[in-house]
Amino acid sequence: MNAKVSKKFSISELVMKLVRHQLFIPIAALLLLAIFNLINDPSFYKVTLGYSSTGDPVLSGYPITILDFGSELAILAIGMTLVTAATGGQDISVGATIAISGSVVLRMLCGPDGRAETMQMPIVVAFLISCVVAMLCGAFNGVLVAYFKIQPMVATLILYTAGRSIAAWINNNRLPIVKEESFKVFGGFIPGIPIPTPFFIALACIILMTLVLRFTNLKLYTQAVGINESSARLNGLNPAMIKFITFVILGICVAVAGLIKVSRLSTINYSVVAKDIEMDAILAVALGGNALSGGKFSMGASILGAYVIQFLTTTLYKLEVPSDALSAYKAIVVILLVVMSAPTVRKWFSDLGKKLKAKASVKEVG
Amino acid sequence: MLKMNTKKKLTDTNLLLLITIVVFFVMYIGAMIFLGEGFLKTQTFFNILNANAALLIVSCGMSLVMITGGIDISVGGVAALVSMCCAVYLDHKGGNIFVSILIAVGIGLAFGLVQGFLIAYLDVQPFIVTLAGMFFARGMTTIVNTNPFNVANEKFVALKDTRIVVPFMGSTNRLGKYVDAYIQIGVVVAILVVILMYFMLKWTKQGRNFYAVGGNSQSALMLGINVKKTKFISYVISGLLAGIGGYVYFLYVGSGSASHASGMEMNAIASSIIGGTMLTGGVGNIVGTLFGVLSLSTIKNIVSSAGLGDAWWTNITIALMLCLFLVIQSVVMARKKRGLKKS
């Protein structure tokens, strides 16, 4: 990770530098999980090439599952990182908004009574409409946070409660089923390619986001607003507008994740779809070493964090932890992470380090 | 208190409180006029109390935490965990009631202590800690027992069905017979909690400290208030009340299930906000919270008796109401700021 290591650096300094690097936490967690699985059961890494019912090559195995489901999370993590950086809070309505946008896609494809045999419109149009709806949800959160100055988590609590109900209401509580196979592509496999499609969608989102961050001032501006809102304002930025924009971008990410979610099943279960995903998305941002109180961020670290979280989830599933109990284990991971990154604890650790160093130097002198 | 202030000027606290009380009475009287029947009976009101005693207790804790400038969204999870643990203890192990109450209080205290320590002494964001607390509690509930079941413990069922008659408040039924109005034990506990919390916040030194810390923790620190300890205590009390509230909830439903008390944290936050507690801290009142809970539960009743029985309408109305009151608060705050600038 560190390109230049001259002989001047002693080993301890090198270690300290490594530890302080933002990618250290996600990579360390990844290695820890990887080694744990290797010891526990090496067959975890077995990937088999099979053929689906239509005769297309399909890869399967735990690593592929991680790649598959981690991609949804990575897409959400992109938006969540921006929101976290700009507002210093998190959007907890993403799961509910996924339900809404997924419900919109189904409503558009299956028509008002949800029984249409063929798709009522091209998937792209349905997706664009769901994009608009999800962006409106994001805009709603954004207005509350940016213009009414309500704490992000409380503002998004509104959609968190109402979202799934709204999703059910959009389809009159029916469960429309898309019967055409071509809809399954987004959450499954493109014919002829054995790697799950969500991975490519996530890749496209990541490339798009990298380009946006590279060629616009978005990163600089969000960080400036996150670090100090009033000084950003004095420098001619419009903090409210930037916060608003981050929520709208998160809305787009949610729409993409929503499409993948409904495509997996070709239908939707309002109370279960994307359940607890907000926790995973926040966890991905935190695991990426980004400060949950806003400011500087690293998009790459968040995305890596998302895959590590999925790695953790898959590992827990492998250990036959029931899906409802997963949240308890993840909660412990969150607490450990935030405690480790808490300023008070960090200070305590650095003081401890200094003390040890002082002792060592005393010994050397002695 | 209101009389005194109409003479001078309405403070933020009283303005928000006034809005809540007016909203509640307008809603209830409106329901009496337009929906009639059920709402004219006194028992309907007592039923609302019976069903929402647990919410009231939990909301008191929530208000306290919000007055101190934090938030606690683990309460619903804790309530579910408490009812599941007590249900398993009473039904599968055949335990006695006093120990089950101890279990409830113990679980609540444990959550309060850990969360309070993390938030107050380690400076971790309250939302993250309590969100993790909520997920932990929900996960633990399924680990303790996955399937929902009813408690058949005789002593417990007797306690659950205990009815306390409210004198002079009964009504005559269709046959012209006088029927006593009744409340359950949970309501008594809830009223006790409300009174205790009201006095604590109003007239004790510790109570005033909560407001000082929530209003401006920096100045509170300079006044010599132990800010960390105050925050810590607020979370411990909230956890404790979540435990008690969980037991009262358990007493009302009489079963254990992982999906119990779902959305309770949301309802508690909404009640507190509707009751005039400011998210920014330093402003709030337990009487307001009481009316917040009553407004919220009345609107739920109205929605269901107006024929919009589907579950989603309740959620949407609560969310709308929360949204409305949040915006009102935000406007009040903006007005206050402008007022400060002028002076």
Image (cartoon, rainbow, N blue to C red):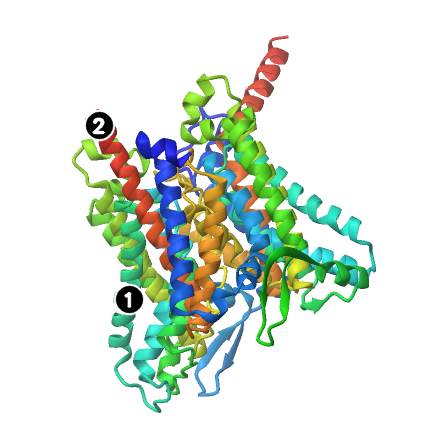
Q: Is residue B121 above or below residue B267?
A: above
Q: Is residue B25 above or below residue B62?
A: below
Residue count near mark 2 (Cα–Cα under 10 Å), binned few <14, some 14–19, many ≥20: few
Q: Residue furthest left?
A: A236
Q: Position of residue B108 (x, y in %)?
A: 65, 45
Q: Which mark is residue A133?
A: 1
Residue B224 seen anywhere in this rendered image of the structure: yes
Residue at x-position 55% and y-position 30%: B121
Q: Residue furthest bottom?
A: A117
Q: Position of residue A185 (x, y in %)?
A: 38, 78
Looking at the rendered image, the quarter that the N terminus of chain A falls into is top left
Residue at x-position 47% and y-position 74%: A269
Task: Give whichever of B170, A78 is nearer the camera.
Answer: B170
Q: Mark 1 to mark 2: distance in Å? A: 39 Å
Q: Which residue is mark 2?
A: B341
Tally the numbered discs: 2
Task: Give whichever of B128, A70 is nearer the camera.
Answer: B128
A128 vs B116, left or right, is left
Q: Position of residue A173 (x, y in %)?
A: 42, 77
Q: Is residue A13 above or below residue A296?
A: above
Residue count near mark 1 (Cα–Cα under 10 Å), binned few <14, some 14–19, many ≥20: many
Task: Give whichever of B262, A120 is nearer the camera.
Answer: B262
Task: Give whichever of A125, A32 is nearer the camera.
Answer: A125
